[in-house]
C-alpha cells in the first residue's frame, strides 16, 4: 500500500520578511487554497495560536485583509472568510490573460541568462512544495517566481496589478491534486516556461502562460478543463 498523500497544514511564518508580512502571506495562501473556507469564522487569538505568533502581527494582517476584501468583520465574533463568485474568478482570469502571456512573449527575446539559475531554484521550490503538499510554500514560491519574471520587464505598476490579481484567485482544487499526485506534475510547467524563455521562444512562452492561467478556472479550482 502506498503512503497517504501529505495533508496541507498551516505553518508558522518564517523569518525571511517581517512577521506581519509572513502572517499576511500565510493567511492569503490559506484562503486561496481553501484551508480557510468561505464563510468560516476566525479571530485574532485563534489565528495567533494557529501560526504560533503574537496577536499584534495577526491583527495587522487581518485588518489589511479586511480592507482588501478577503475577510469581513462580524460583530463580537471576529472575521468571516469571504466568498468569491465564479463570475468574479472568470473576470480575474480574463484580465490576467490580457497581461501575463503578452508580457512573457515580450520578455523572451531579451531574457537575461544570468537570472536563469535563480529562477530555476524558485521553480524547484514550487515543485517541491507541490510534492510535499505544503500549499503555503507552493503558493509563496509561485508568487515570487511569476512576479520576478514580470519584474524583469521593468514595469512595477504591471507587477503590482498581477500580484493583486493572483491573490484574488481561489484554488480550492489544489488539495485534491496533492492527494492524487498531479500537482507536482502541473508544477513542472514553471520549468517549461523557463525553457521557452531561455530559448527566446516568445510565441511558445505566450501559449504556455495562457494554458497556465487557464488552470486557475480548471483543475486548480477543482473543475474539469476542456
Image (tube, rainbow, N blue to C red):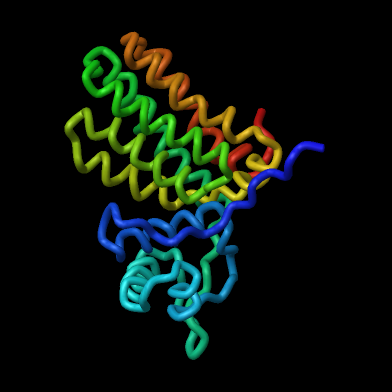
| Location of residue 215 in the rendering, given as x and y in whole percent from the top left corner | 56, 35
Quadrant where the image shows the C terminus: top right
Which quadrant of the figure has residue 60? bottom left
| Location of residue 50 in the rendering, given as x and y in whole percent from the top left corner | 50, 70
Q: In the shown orientation, is residue 191 left or right of residue 111?
A: right
Q: In the shown orientation, is residue 41 left or right of residue 4?
A: left
| Location of residue 27 in the rendering, given as x and y in whole percent from the top left corner | 44, 61
Query: Viewer-proximal residue, 41 or 224?
Result: 41
User: Residue at position x 42%, y 21% from top?
Assistant: 193
Residue furthest left as drawn: 154
Looking at the picture, does residue 165 appear above or below residue 116?
A: below
Which quadrant of the figure has residue 143? top left
User: Residue at position x 34%, y 25% from top?
Assistant: 102
Looking at the picture, does residue 125 appear above or below residue 172?
A: above
Query: Viewer-proximal residue, 3 or 124?
Result: 3
Query: Viewer-proximal residue, 51 or 79?
Result: 51
| Location of residue 195 in the rendering, given as x and y in whole percent from the top left corner | 40, 15
Quadrant where the image shows the N terminus: top right
Looking at the picture, does residue 109 appear above or below residue 131?
A: above
Residue furthest right as drawn: 1
Q: In the shown orientation, is residue 2 left or right of residue 23?
A: right
Which quadrant of the figure has residue 61? bottom left
Amino acid at each position: 500500500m502506498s503512503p497517504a498523500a501529505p495533508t496541507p497544514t498551516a505553518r508558522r511564518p518564517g523569518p525571511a520578511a517581517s512577521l506581519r508580512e509572513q502572517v499576511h502571506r500565510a493567511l492569503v495562501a490559506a484562503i486561496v487554497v481553501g484551508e480557510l473556507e468561505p464563510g468560516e469564522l476566525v479571530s485574532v487569538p485563534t489565528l495567533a495560536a494557529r501560526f504560533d505568533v503574537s496577536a499584534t502581527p495577526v491583527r495587522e494582517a487581518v485588518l489589511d485583509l479586511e480592507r482588501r476584501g478577503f475577510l469581513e468583520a462580524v460583530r463580537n465574533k471576529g472575521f468571516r472568510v469571504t466568498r468569491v463568485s465564479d463570475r468574479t474568478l472568470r473576470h480575474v482570469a480574463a484580465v490576467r490573460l490580457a497581461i501575463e502571456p503578452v508580457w512573457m512573449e515580450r520578455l523572451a527575446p531579451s531574457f537575461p541568462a544570468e537570472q536563469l539559475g535563480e529562477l530555476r531554484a524558485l521553480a524547484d521550490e514550487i515543485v517541491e512544495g507541490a510534492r510535499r503538499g505544503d500549499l503555503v510554500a507552493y503558493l509563496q514560491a509561485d508568487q515570487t517566481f511569476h512576479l520576478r519574471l514580470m519584474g524583469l520587464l521593468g514595469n512595477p505598476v504591471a507587477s503590482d496589478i498581477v500580484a493583486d490579481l493572483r491573490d484574488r484567485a481561489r484554488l480550492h482544487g489544489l488539495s485534491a491534486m496533492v492527494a492524487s499526485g498531479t500537482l507536482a506534475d502541473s508544477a513542472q510547467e514553471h520549468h517549461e516556461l523557463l525553457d521557452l524563455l531561455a530559448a527566446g521562444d516568445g510565441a511558445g512562452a505566450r501559449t504556455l502562460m495562457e494554458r497556465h492561467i487557464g488552470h486557475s478556472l480548471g483543475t486548480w479550482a477543482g473543475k474539469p478543463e476542456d
